[in-house]
Image (cartoon, helix red, strand yellow):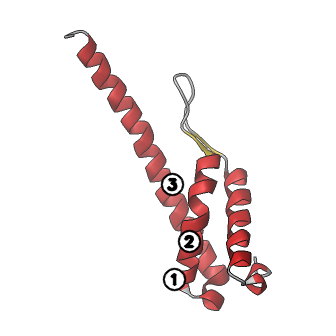
Amino acid sequence: MKKILPILVVIAIVVGLKFYNKSKVSNEIKADATEQLQQELGPALGEEYVAELVDYAHPEAMEQAYKMGGKRSSEEFDNATYQRIFVRKILEKLQNDGKQDAASML
């Protein structure tokens, strides 16, 4: 048991750091996406609605675009995948909310 405990602690730290890094990257990307979308759609739709759009689109886009890596690979963020999914989700939400005219602004 004494030999296993340090190994478990190291594994927990490594896994914790991977999740911390993912969270940090996610927060930075979400802030950038919010800023960009506020500039594009904020005047027409309002800041609250734009924040709602980002909250709707960001989680799935981030999940698909960010790979935490494994034992022998580092984390990886695919910006093109993020943008593609993010825009698709934004357009989906605009259409579901009856705001097709705002979709043409993207």
Q: Amino acid at mark 2?
A: Thr
Q: Amino acid at mark 3?
A: Ser
The extreme bottom residue here reads 44
Depth order, front residue of 93/32: 93
Separation (CA) of disc 3 from disc 2? 12 Å
Q: Amino acid at mark 1?
A: Glu
Residue visible at 27% across and 12% down in the picture: 4
Mark number displayed over residue 48: 1
Residue visible at 59% across and 49% down in the picture: 63
Secondary element under disc 1, as helix, strand or loop, is helix
Task: Look at mark 3 in the image and give the residue it sits on.
Answer: 26
Q: Quadrant of the N terminus?
A: top left
Q: Residue 72's x, y, as percent?
A: 55, 22
Separation (CA) of disc 2 from disc 1? 11 Å
Indicate which disc, 3 or 1, sits on the residue closer to the N terminus: 3
Indicate which disc, 2 or 1, sits on the residue closer to the N terminus: 2
Residue visible at 62% across and 81% down in the picture: 39
Dividing the picture into quarters, in which one does residue 58 lie? bottom right
Task: Look at mark 2 in the image and give the residue it sits on.
Answer: 34
